[in-house]
Every structure is written in C-alpha cells, then in structure tokens.
Image (cartoon, rainbow, N blue to C red):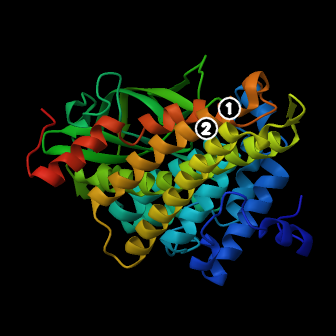
Amino acid sequence: MTLAPSSADLEAAAAVDPSDLISFDSLLSADELTVRDRVRTYVRQEIKPNIAKWYDEARFPLEIVPDLAELGLLGMHLKGYGCAGGTAVDYGIAAAELEAGDSGIRTFVSVQGSLAMSAIAKHGSEEQKLEWLPQMAAGRAIGCFGLTEPTAGSDPSSMTTFARRDGGDWVLNGTKRWIGLANVAQVAVIWAQTDDGVRGFVVPTETPGFTATPIQQKLSMRASIQCEITLNDVRLPAGAVLPNATGLRGPFACLNEARYGIAWGTMGAARDAFEDALTYSMGRLQFGRPLAGYQLTQQKLVNMALEINKGFLLALHLGRLKDAGRLQPHQISVGKLNNCREAIEICREARTILGGNGITLEHSPLRHANNLESVRTYEGTDEVHTLILGQKLTGTGAFR
C-alpha cells in the first residue's frame, strides 16, 4: 500500500463532515487539516474495509504498525528521538480519525505513545530514552504500561506489586491486569511499590519471570489486546528504574496524556456512528418513505449532531490550552467524562435508526458502543472523573 494520498483521496477526506453544523474546519490551520486528511484517508482505505473481520476474529492487526509509524503517529506529540514532534491538537485530530475506524486502533497509538513512550520521555534517563524511544517511534518495538492490578484499578495507591532491592539489582513480584499490548510488547513500563514509594521500571519483556497472558472472551475492544502480567522474581539492573518519577504523580502524568486523546477519540467514534445512521436513514424506506423523512428520526439525528459538535469544540479548546501550556488536570477530566458519556449515548441512539440491521458488524454504531464501554472505564471511570471535578468545585475530596 501507499501512504501518500492522491488528490482525489484528499478531496474526499476534506469533504464537509455531515455532522458539522458550525464550520468546525474553519477553526483548524492548514497543517492541522493536512494531518486530519492523511489519517482520515488511511483509515478509510485500510481500517474500515477490514475492521469488521478483525473485530469478529478478536485480532489486533499487527501488520498495520509500520503504517502507523510511517504516518508519524507513534509518540506523535513527543519531540526528538525520532518522534514527530506534533502539537497537542495534531495528536487529538489523529486520535479522532483513528477512533472513527475503531477504538482498538486509537488505543494502540495511545498505549504506545501517551503511556509507554511518554513515561520514558517524561521520567526516563537519557540512556533509556536513547535505547527505546527511536525504536518505538519507528514501530520496531512495542511498549505497554503496567499500572492497574486485579484489586487495584481506580485506586492505584493500593497496588501490591513490589520491587525490593537485592544488592545492586531490583526484584519485582506481583500481578498487573488490563494491560494493553503486553503479550506483543518488547518493553513494559511497570509501576511498583518500593520502600521509598511508587517507582516506575523499564522492563524488557524477555526478562525471565515476565509473563503476559491475553484476556479472552471479551464483548468490547475485540480488535485490541489486553493482558494480565505476572511478575515472578523479575530481576532488573539498577538502571531499569525511571529516575525522575517517585510516587503516583509519575503514572498520573502519563494517564493525563491518554485521557486528553480520549476526549478527541470518542468524538471520532460518535461521528462515524452518526454518519452510518444518517446514510442508512436516507436510503431505508419504511411505509413508503425514507426514515430520514420522519420527525422522530430527524430529532435523533439533530440531537446527535449537536453533541458531536459540542464535543469537538471542547476537545479543540483543551488542545489549544495544552499547546499553550495552560491545560489543568481537572480540565482533562471534563473532556474525558463528557465526551465518553455523550459518545456512547450517540452510538446507542444511532443503532436504533438501523433497527435490527444495527446489531451486525455490517454497521459500526454497536461496535463503537461496545468499545466505548471500555474507553469509558479505562484511564478513569465516570465516577473517578466526577469526584475529581467535585473536588475542584467544592474544595472537598470525596474519594474515601
């Protein structure tokens, strides 16, 4: 395949989005529109024709990783070490287009770039950055990010994975769960308790004692990989520890990168579900007229389009704040909470327009809705982000 879109491809990609009621494109620069058109063209050509098969087979297509690297999407927002050095808005736009294809595709880019690569870039030594970031940006090495555990999800402070000193080495023991890409990764960033608080470790997955087992029989994120990691006396040299992160602020800084991308990505899924329903409604005849000609259908379509427009405006505002260095953690929670919540409702509503045909993989809304059950849960549930915002509004923490 070629990643250089033709003029016809770019013209098609740049066509007005059916859901756009506010001329959203006028808010984007020429460079930002170019990013959008390149990723949109790739998704339309390579992801959408194949995603139903991948989803049905419960398979993440590793064969697309070199394409994602060539598009500059792996560690897209990071600078140096072979990374693209794009803006926050660039990354957000790309996330939306990828998730219009499938949440599993956007999740790969998020785990690789916003979590694993960001952890090394933010907290790693120069040696760690030089060893791993160029490989990961080029797609030659895949990374994963081990924070959550079977009994420590929303409350990572209760993690039991422990790293003890043994002479000059570290020895890790514990279990991590719901870790994306772990069984295909070459490197894992593992967070563990130590005598001095939570620390991060760069763990080559070939290290003896590291085992990653895929979680099977999922109803969501089927074209994606989630695993349970077992750490059994995993011995690491002193240089494996991330030197610039102590405590939970280390992993939380990476989680906020991923949460920001989700605010954009979920709107991509919602937009794709809307477009599927809109197209279907204009061609499906019932009682002698198209579904789109009924008031109840138009009400559904209008309500969906309004929320998509508002969601994209919120995401763009957060991106502009991030690029200006003014984005606050609670503002990311606004985007993650609102856009996940609205996107899943849009996808469910879109499915109702499709009727019984909407439960098949011929159409995208129910696949997106199922995926969004996972997206709504990872990187902070609705409840966690509600409590973050509640504390911001009242000044009183209510987590415990």
Which residue position is annotated with label 1? 351
Counting from the top left corner in percent of width and height, residue 383 is at: 30, 35
Q: Residues within 10 Å of mark 1 (few under 14, many from 20)?
A: many
Task: Tell me whether the residue at label 2 lies in contact with that at label 1, contact meaning CB atoms closer than 8 angstroms.
Answer: yes
Residue nearer the viewer, 256 or 368: 368
* Residue type highlighted by circle 1: Arg
Residue nearer the viewer, 331 or 125: 331
Residue 347 numbered tag: 2
310 vs 251, left or right, is: right
The answer to whether residue 243 shows anywhere in this view is no
Q: How many marks?
A: 2
At mark 1, the secondary structure is: helix
Q: Residue at x 53, y 37 (%)?
A: 345
The answer to whether residue 347 shows anywhere in this view is yes
Residue nearer the viewer, 316 or 139: 316
Residue 393 numbered tag: none
Q: Residues within 10 Å of mark 2 (few under 14, many from 20)?
A: many
* Residue type highlighted by circle 2: Cys
150 vs 22, left or right, is: left
Residue nearer the viewer, 4 or 344: 344
Counting from the top left corner in percent of width and height, residue 317 is at: 43, 69
152 vs 290, left or right, is: left
* Figure check: 96 above or below 285: below
75 vs 279, left or right, is: left
* Figure check: 200 above or below 381: below
At mark 2, the secondary structure is: helix
Q: Tell me the distance, in whole angstroms, between the alpha carbons under discs 2 and 1.
A: 6 Å
